[in-house]
Image (tube, rainbow, N blue to C red):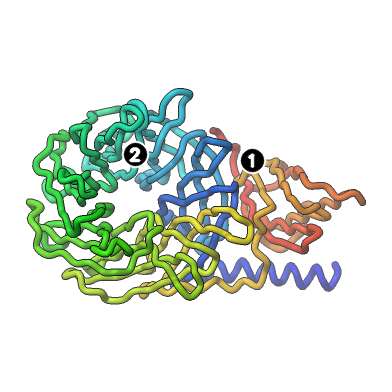
Amino acid sequence: MSCKSSLFNLFLVLFLNSIMLSLFSQVRFEKSYPFMNETIGYGVTQTFDDGYAICGTFRAGEILKGLVIRTDAVGDTLWTRLYENALYAFCPVPEGGFLFTGWHNSSHEQNLLMMKTDKYGNIEWENSVGTASSIGRSICRTADSGYCIVGGTTPYAMAAERMLVVRINKNGNLRWTKLFGDGVLSLNGQSIILDNNAGFMICGTKSSEMETGSDMVLLNIDSAGNAIWMKTYNKSLHSDQGYGIINTLSGGYFAAGIARLPDNSHQALYLVRTNDQGDTIWTKTFDTLAWASPGVHAIPCNSGGFAITGVVYDPVSSTNNVLLKRFDAEGNILWGQIFGSLGHEYAFNLNTTSDQGFIVSGSVWDPVFQTTDAYLAKTDDQGHVTPVSTDYKELPRNICIFPDPTPGLFTLTSVDPVLEITVINFKGVTVREITSQPTAIHTVTTDLSSLPNGIYMVKIRTTEGFFLRKVIKDRPVHQ
């Protein structure tokens, strides 16, 4: 074995060991996941093995389809799954899989999607409901192990959106659907949680009756989907929008949204604290959000209070960056962080992690390659982000390996000519090696069928240099 190969294999072992060690500390990273020309991560959750799963969409021609990216604890891709239907939100299920919502693409309409997968992303069942243009935006588990989904439906072009709420059992069978709104003034649902009385709380946006914009709205429904109360919250004469809703430890709710300031030149973070009946206890605004903010997401924190994420504009770099703020139970700021070093970052979702940190998903616009990629950032408990130091070159956007995990065969495609592929097992031993002909190729198929299941490193040499990628050899994939 050459000295160069020995050094590389030593580095590989140290690299894998660093991943294991990182599981016991507050890992911090910021990464993008290029796939197609427009990839967005809408939802994020931590998985049973302290890794992460992102769901979202990618553009295939004129249609947005769905994808799930599964990473390890330091944000490196373990596998990617592609779906015909768009995915917008999801939640883990007790048996280890995921329940997704979004929209179902058909030849003549778009319906609200419900899809259950196992932990590898293989579809177990899927269903859809709604007519014309419908979408599911948020999902929560119910006390009976089922799910309740909120979204919206628009019956025809130029019509006002109505809020659509769907309840299903754990097998995807429909229990009931409810529509709210008069069809004249738009009413949408952005997030749903269990309320304090076995029903559900929904946060969204309603068109103002005075035709001056829109207002944040909270809707309380019982377990059968019947409305108990609905209230609006108007901070300004312009556009107020509701996005996030969480329970408070002392009863009542926190709602988070966006308010347009009077000069109409900025967007402000808009917080509302209510009692159980939706009566306002206090409201607060913070002039922090960018015009391009896709909304805000709020989550409760274990120690009380809550955290939100959004988007701010940096006039120095002329880019949009991620905002992460932590509040106490009275809405006072404990700390705030702004980060983003990959381009124009947009935050769509936020969750807590087992090490008391935070995980943010969204998208990043790369001005160099003119693409939108999925985005993931892991912070510590104070919202700090630091790229993981691995001393190896990230997989470039012009290389794709699929499927991953693979039952055996996987295909690597590259815009840059591929000169050599080396597959290495966990012990640092080379198990496959492919060298191209003098005329370099752009597509290479590799067979791992005879090898044991496990994680393998793929060392790729192109005309642009060497790159590393992990590939999982797993049981056959059923889609």
Residue closer to the observer: 141 or 165: 165
Residue depth check, mark 2 versus mark 1: number of the one nearer the observer: 2
Which of 319 and 91 lies nearest the eye of the viewer?
319
First along the sequence among labels 2 and 1? 2
Badge 1: residue crowd in 10 Å (few <14, some 14–19, many ≥20): some
Residue at 31% over, 33% down: 153
Whether residue 25 sits left or right of residue 300 in the image: it is right
Most foreground residue, 26 or 221: 221
Q: Residue at x 44, y 23 (%)?
A: 108
**Which residue is drawn at the image coordinates 54% and 71% (left, top)?**
387
Q: At which x and y percent is residue 463?
A: 81, 59
On the question of residue 304 being in view, the answer is: yes
Q: Would you say 212 lies left or right of 366 here?
A: left
Residue corresponding to mark 2: 136
Image quadrant occupied by the C terminus: top right
Mark drawn on residue 263: none
- Foreground residue among 256 and 402: 256
Estimate how packed mark 2 is, as few (under 14), some (14 to 19) or many (20 or more) residues with alpha carbons within 10 Å: many
Q: Where is the N terminus found, in terms of image quarters?
A: bottom right
- Specify the amino acid type for callout 1: Pro
Return the residue at label 1: 407
**What kind of residue is marked 2?**
Gly
Find the residue positioned furthest to the right: 438
Residue 197, horizontal then vertical, whole percent: 11, 47
**At 42% across and 61% down in the image, what residue appears?**
360
Across and down, in percent, residue 244 comes to: 27, 54
- Residue 366: where, in percent of width, then height? 57, 59
Describe the element under mark 1 as helix, strand or loop.
loop
